[in-house]
Amino acid sequence: MIVARGLTKTYGPKVAVDGLSFTVEPGRVTGFLGPNGAGKSTTMRMMVGLDRPTAGTVTINGRSYADSAAPLRTVGALLEARALHPGRSARNHLRWLAASNGIPVRRVDEVLDLVGLTDVADQRVGRFSLGMGQRLGIAVALLGDPPVVVLDEPVNGLDPEGIRWVRTLARELASQGRTVLVSSHLMSEMALTADHLIVVGRGRMLADCSMAQFIADH
Ligand code: ADP
Ligand code: ADP
């Protein structure tokens, strides 16, 4: 479960996230919808300890990661700004992350298979297409078999088959009882993926309700 209370982030005069309070429950897919610049990425970065809140708190299963990055076994995150080392192969990248996070190395082949990268696992990441990069980012997010999965714009760069795959994956992770938060700027995408919707604009909460309720209201 993810709990945000009065979560706020300012960059100089710019208020990127403006007092957001919400709960992301396990066992369902929560969609995080809002136009570009609404504050979704900043909110997700604060969840995993990549950005420090200016005010307020966000906890994952009761813990705040404001002072230390969340371990891969607690929360798996696909975040736009996280660069992958271009000279490493996908397999090496995952092996290194597994080793440095106390994750059994056999998990590497499991997640490569899960995201469909087994055949290109030994190619340099620098040669990957956007879609392959997204798949590798998702592999990293799932490497630690985490109870909480946060995916920022996961369908970016994927082809239609890849997009359907991400939807199915998100739903599967939720049906396993995990907490799943998926962001998008597209309502059409959220409608096909999420059970629950959190809508933000200019850093503020616009709606927090079930998908069925949101569709009935709009
Ligand atoms: P979204 O993910 O919804 O597109 P972001 O969280 O990326 O939104 O951005 C929210 C706002 O915060 C935007 O106006 C963006 O320009 C600003 N912002 C994000 N990161 C920074 C930063 N490092 N420095 C200054 N402004 C930033
Ligand atoms: P550092 O860069 O601080 O030496 P790591 O690169 O191992 O340490 O990353 C620190 C934490 O960031 C990891 O434990 C993991 O939770 C997370 N992390 C690192 N790389 C990625 C990635 N590509 N995608 C998602 N999370 C990552």
Image: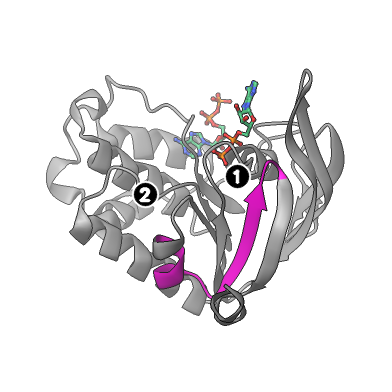
Along the line of sight, the residue nearer the viewer: 165 or 89: 165
Instruction: Identify the amino acid type marked 1.
Output: Lys
Q: Mark 1 Cα within 10 Å, few/some/many (few <14, many 20+)? A: many
Q: What element carries label 1?
A: helix
Residue 34 lies, with reference to residue 92, above or below; the image says below
Does residue 37 appear anywhere in the picture?
A: yes
Above or below residue 168? Residue 33 is above
Q: Toward the viewer: 77 or 74?
A: 77
Classify mark 2 as within 8 Å of ligand 2 or not, answering yes or no. no
Residue 4 location, quadrant = bottom right
Please give the range of residues in magenta: 189-203
Which residue is disc 2 drawn over?
139
Of all residues, the one furthest to the front in this rendering is 218
Give the residue at mark 1.
40
Q: Position of residue 202 (x, y in %)?
A: 68, 41
Judge whether residue 61 is colored magenta.
Answer: no
Q: In this view, does 11 lie to the left or right of 99?
A: right
Can residue 192 be found in the magenta stretch?
Answer: yes
Q: Can residue 73 be seen in this view?
A: no
